[in-house]
Image (tube, rainbow, N blue to C red):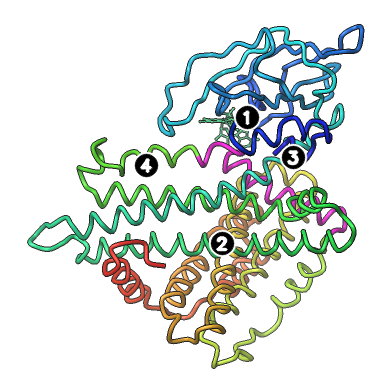
Amino acid sequence: MPVLYFGTEAQRQKYLPKLGTGEIKAAYCLTEPGSGSDSLSARTKATLSEDGTYYLLEGQKMWITNAGFADLFTVFAQVDGNKFTAFLVDATLDNIRLGNEEDKMGIKGSSTRQVFFEGVKVPVENLLGEIGKGHKIAFNVLNIGRYKLGLMVCGGAKRACEMTVKYANERIQFKLPISKFGAIKYKLAEQATRIWVLESMNYRIAGLLNDKIEQCKADGKNDIQAKLIAAEEYAIECSISKVFGSEVLDYVVDECVQVHGGNGFSEEYNAARAYRDARINRIFEGTNEINRLLTFDMLMRRAMSGQIDIMTPAMAVQKDLMSIPDFGGDDDDDILAADKKAIREAKKAILMVAGAAVQKYMQKIEKEQEIIMNLADMLIDVFTAESAILRTDKLIALRGVEACSDYIDMTKIYTSEAMERIQLSGKHAVCAFTEEGDEQRMMLMGIRRYTKYPAYNAVAARRRIAQRLIDANDYAF
Ligand SMILES: Cc1cc2nc3c(=O)[nH]c(=O)nc-3n(C[C@H](O)[C@H](O)[C@H](O)COP(=O)(O)OP(=O)(O)OC[C@H]3O[C@@H](n4cnc5c(N)ncnc54)[C@H](O)[C@@H]3O)c2cc1C
């Protein structure tokens, strides 16, 4: 991807066809022993030779996927001490040394090694992009990588859900298949619901990216420019996909192990491997903590630069809070009316908490990470629940309500609980930055008001969803 998006025509001609066919393989060298999340502080150095024909590369990269067999390394290094820059480094060059294969917890089928550049002469034509603009390459590639990770974990989660259902149908205890027990049905339904919500969000992001790409092309941008603009525009959504997707997968594989009982703890079954393999997804492509921080940070930057207006709606929410609650106005014929209203209101809760927190801390808000985590969680819950509602709404329009009962169940199971989580996150945040008194009371009241959801029998809904899985003996949606 770095070559595709940032390479010169000559670099693309040289590498892309062979990368496309798999004749050569690539690795991405950003992380170092001293710089992981703080990737821009990398210490690897690139020094231009006196005759100006090559850069001398010296440094150490760590955790490099594909390192054992890569033909091409994209390496990030500092030019003149502080100009973060990317280079394309052929593995055939002299003075590249590999560390041993890492002894990893999971994904043992992938090669992960350290790569040492011990005075490697990289021809100047292998500079990638511009000197000092390496961060653009690193971050854009990560944006797209995060979205891809969200898709990949969705596939993995479906597979683990399938394994869980099959085992639950086969395993007999107390003279019954364990899939007959409500406690197991809960797990099956919850696995499927979270996967379905994740998939709904991923489709939504794909649609947003596609629309933006088409719009940019219509405005005269070429394909590459259009894709980069789209990836930047939806960087927040890509981060959400990564965070939510990796956490859905973790839930699914954890319950997969649990449903397997003792066998889940044995390497003779695939559940153990799925459990180990899943864990890395919360760590690479930016840890989930870093992605949660980024989600809020990107939103704030856009607000500060005037790209989006948060303060006007935040002020409107403060006024709304003083007014008498509106209990009417919904379309009673719409089976998702309560869910749509819940999302509209939950957005107010986010605006209220974010607006008040920013007013209190101003620029120093970035030091209040716990509050940012709460806000990021609220955003994730709203975006994911809304994605499920939008998808179900479309499916209902296409197929009618009757044919969509499973989707309606899953949407309501998820949205009803998302509201409770949003309430809790909002409460924690507000209590962290307000003192006991009128202001705090009013804000807590606001949060309760904006996160209401009608009484809902999620037990019955989960039983219906679980039954679909049990009957299909597979992930059924
Ligand atoms: C199997 C595997 C494959 C990998 N493949 C590649 C690859 O191909 N190329 C590559 O360049 N890298 C790769 N990585 C590296 C990976 O991207 C990093 O491990 C990851 O970014 C985290 O960096 P770190 O390990 O240094 O952890 P650290 O940055 O030290 O983080 C440790 C903990 O502190 C938290 N933390 C750090 N900073 C903050 C902060 N500001 N605020 C709050 N919390 C913070 C983190 O969230 C984490 O929980 C791979 C890693 C693994 C394990």
Label 3 sits on residue:
4
In the picture of the structure, the residue carrying the numbered disc 2 is 381
Residue denoted by label 1? 26
Q: Amino acid at mark 2?
A: Asp
What residue is at 66 percent from the left and 15 percent from the top? 92
What kind of element bears circle 2? helix
Residue at mark 4:
275
The part of the chain drawn in magenta is: 281-307
Task: Please identify the quadrant where the N terminus is shown.
Answer: top right
User: Crowdedness of circle 3 by 10 Å Cα count: few (<14), some, many (20+)?
Assistant: some
**Residue 453 or residue 192, whichever sits in front:** 192
> Based on the displayed image, in which of its 4 quarters is residue 369 positioned?
top right
Q: Secondary structure at mark 3?
A: helix
Real-space CA distance between mark 2 and mark 3, rounded to the nearest whole angstrom: 34 Å
Location of the C terminus (image quadrant): bottom left
Q: Residues within 10 Å of mark 4 (few under 14, many from 20)?
A: many
Check the image and report above or below for 328 versus 320: below
Residue 122 or residue 346, whichever sits in front: 122
Comes first in the chain, label 3 or label 4: 3
Disc 1 marks a residue whose amino acid type is Ala
Q: Secondary structure at mark 4?
A: helix
Question: Is 125 on the left or on the right of 198, as rendered?
Answer: right
Total numbered labels placed on residues in the image:
4
Relative to residue 116, is residue 171 drawn left or right? left
Alpha carbon of mark 4 to alpha carbon of mark 2: how far? Answer: 24 Å
Q: Residue 116, percent across and down?
A: 63, 13
